[in-house]
Image (tube, grey):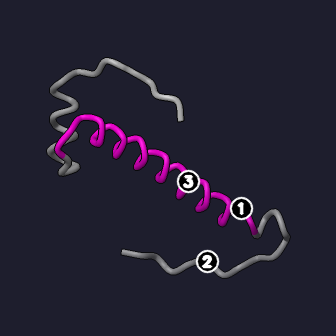
Amino acid sequence: MAKVNIALDAELVVEVMVLAGVGNPQDAVEAVVRDYIARGHRTEARVAGRDEPHRTGQLLPPEPPQG
């Protein structure tokens, strides 16, 4: 796998390390990137699930509110 070197503000990285509970900058940045990607996939899945009835013509009852 290719590696990318970037410069980041040290305060940002330290804050991510604390929030993520990791001990080194590399793991902290990887955790943030992986979380961002996972959120994107979840959003895509929710949007696709919402559009499915319109795409297939099969109307489903609305989901009850979650709260």
Which residue is more in the foreground, 23 or 35?
A: 23
Label annotation for residue 51: 1
Label 2, on which residue? 62
Circle 2: element type: loop
Label annotation for residue 39: none
- Would you say 14 lies left or right of 51 here? left
Which residue is more in the foreground, 25 or 59?
A: 25
Residue 2 coordinates in the image, percent (x, y): 52, 30
Mark 1 vs 3, N-terminal side: 3
Question: Extreme front residue here?
Answer: 1
Mark 2 vs 1, N-terminal side: 1
Image vertical order of residue 45 relative to residue 21, above or below: below
Circle 1: element type: helix
Quarter-of-image position of residue 30? top left
Image point 51% across, 80% down: which residue?
64
Q: Based on the picture, tell me whether residue 56 belongs to the magenta stretch.
A: no
The amino acid type, in three-letter code, at marker 1 is Asp
Q: Main secondary structure of the magenta part?
A: helix
Image point 46% across, 28% down: which residue?
3
Start-end of magenta stretch? 23-52
Q: Based on the picture, tell me whether residue 38 belongs to the magenta stretch.
A: yes
Quarter-of-image position of residue 55? bottom right
Residue contact at pointers 2 and 1, CB within 8 angstroms: no
Which residue is more in the foreground, 44 or 67?
A: 44
The amino acid type, in three-letter code, at marker 3 is His
The amino acid type, in three-letter code, at marker 2 is Pro
Label 3, on which residue? 41
Closer to viewer: mark 2 or mark 1: 1
Which residue is more in the foreground, 27 or 39?
A: 27
